[in-house]
Image: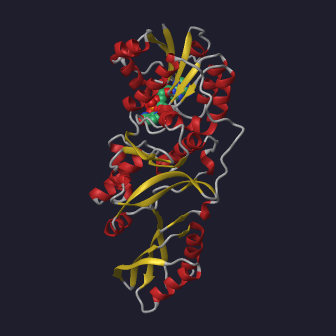
Amino acid sequence: MIAIGVLGLGNVGTGFMELLNSGKQTIENRLGTSVSVKKILVRDTGRPRARLAAGIITDRPDDILEDPSISIVVELMGGLEPARTYIRRALSRGKSVVTANKEVVSCYGAELMDLARENGVRFLFEGSVGGGIPIIRPIKECLAANEIHSVTGILNGTTNFILTRMEEDSMELDDALAEAQRLGYAEADPANDITGADVARKIAILATMAFRRGIIPDVVSTTGIDRVTLADMRYAGELGYRVKLLGHVGRRDDGYEAWVAPALVPLSHPLAGVRDSYNAVMVEGNACGTLMFYGRGAGGLPTASAVMGDVMEVIRGGPLPKFSFTSDSSLALLDSRTAVAPFYIRLKAKDEPGVLAAVSGVFGRHGISLSMVLQKNAAGGIAEIVIVTHKTHLGAIHDALIDLTSLSEVPAVDNYLRVWR
Ligand SMILES: NC(=O)c1ccc[n+]([C@@H]2O[C@H](COP(=O)([O-])OP(=O)(O)OC[C@H]3O[C@@H](n4cnc5c(N)ncnc54)[C@H](OP(=O)(O)O)[C@@H]3O)[C@@H](O)[C@H]2O)c1
């Protein structure tokens, strides 16, 4: 009999208990052993709980961490602390740990992997990226023979839902966010989603798995969706694109790049078809070619499916994995200014002769050639100008935009977005 301790009984913890209950026979037949949850840690024991948790709720972490009969700890509390401390304590006491906590894994994954190795146990985190989508184990195991070139994805269901509503229902961002909150897709404080911080954590984890050297979220160049407007959506559509919040880590000839940013994705690209709260991850490898993993990127039951898969891997046992990321090596990323892409720019300019020439002159001085310039919606002597460049450096775009804002003919540079290949 395998005894499990669960830390946290929220969305995912409840999904985990439901899945264990409904699938108990199948899970135990596949494992050849019985499995049960002995204790569940929560903050507030007075809160009404699912019947499945009756009699095993505690608010004392020691009931799990100090119980020698519990061999697997499933951490589903979220947040950095006390989750990290509890995971460390469990690993130090010879318990394997399974978590869906992207904050802890992206910031302390290397240290926790090292600790697991020292104690001869496992630390698994499939649920931390892409919810129910298997992506960590495919990269780690199924694609282990590949040189991975890049991993690119739509990794945040909340922002993908918001962008979909903006495009399909002609909503501005604030209204689409309110709709996401009403339907339970966005939290009361959506900052981690809107700013791209959540995707940066997932990209840090994926980068580490794909390139086997650690990076932390802070070094991922990150731009959120807060400046994306309905106007951008419409112009993108007219140009044959859809705006998506992408996370990317890739190998270039001169090094590695990692970024999170809203981007114009061609309508014909598979990532453009990922709607609502769905997620997708594309992996490019030298032997496998391009693969796409698609599905529910969040939600209690889908995430519990990934967590349970890890628990079953721990129980199946076998030799401890040699491959993992360790704290003694890190992936050096190239300066984000060196990133190369076409860019979309939306600005306001005086509707006067010679203004377009002045604007294109600024781009020319920074070595940027333009593939398209459209004048839209002139009103009150001010026109909206939409520009798409040929491939250029992000740094050159930044410099050109600074120069443009100093032109008296250009009252505002409203937004710029990279165009995805
Ligand atoms: N929700 C998703 O769709 C999803 C998807 C992928 C990954 N994840 C990750 O899965 C983890 C859990 O997410 P969730 O949505 O299930 O969270 P949640 O609904 O907020 O639940 C958190 C649970 O942890 C307990 N808890 C929190 N802090 C605690 C503390 N200091 N001591 C004891 N118990 C504590 C809470 O106790 P009370 O019930 O007493 O408040 C609650 O039961 C997070 O790391 C999240 O990033 C979530």
- Nearest the viewer among 213 and 361 is 213
Outermost left residue: 169
Q: What colouring does the structure picture have?
A: secondary structure
Q: Give me the residue at 52% from left, 43% from top.
A: 202
Outermost front residue: 287
322 versus 256 height, above or below? above
- How far across and down, in percent of the image, does residue 25 sit? 35, 12
Q: Judge left or right: residue 113 versus residue 48.
A: right
- Nearest the viewer among 416 and 390 is 390
**Quarter of the picture holding the C terminus:** bottom left
351 versus 84 height, above or below? below
Q: Give me the residue at 50% from left, 27% from top.
A: 76
Q: How many marks?
A: 0
351 versus 399 height, above or below? below
Can residue 313 be seen here?
yes
- How far across and down, in percent of the image, does residue 325 sit? 63, 36
Q: Give me the residue at 72% from left, 38% from top.
A: 328
Can residue 51 be seen here?
no
Residue 27's image quarter?
top left
Residue 396's image quarter?
bottom right
- How far across and down, in percent of the image, does residue 157 sit? 40, 45
191 versus 41 height, above or below? below
Q: Judge left or right: residue 147 versus residue 293.
A: right
- How far across and down, in percent of the image, does residue 207 sit? 57, 45
Outermost bottom residue: 353
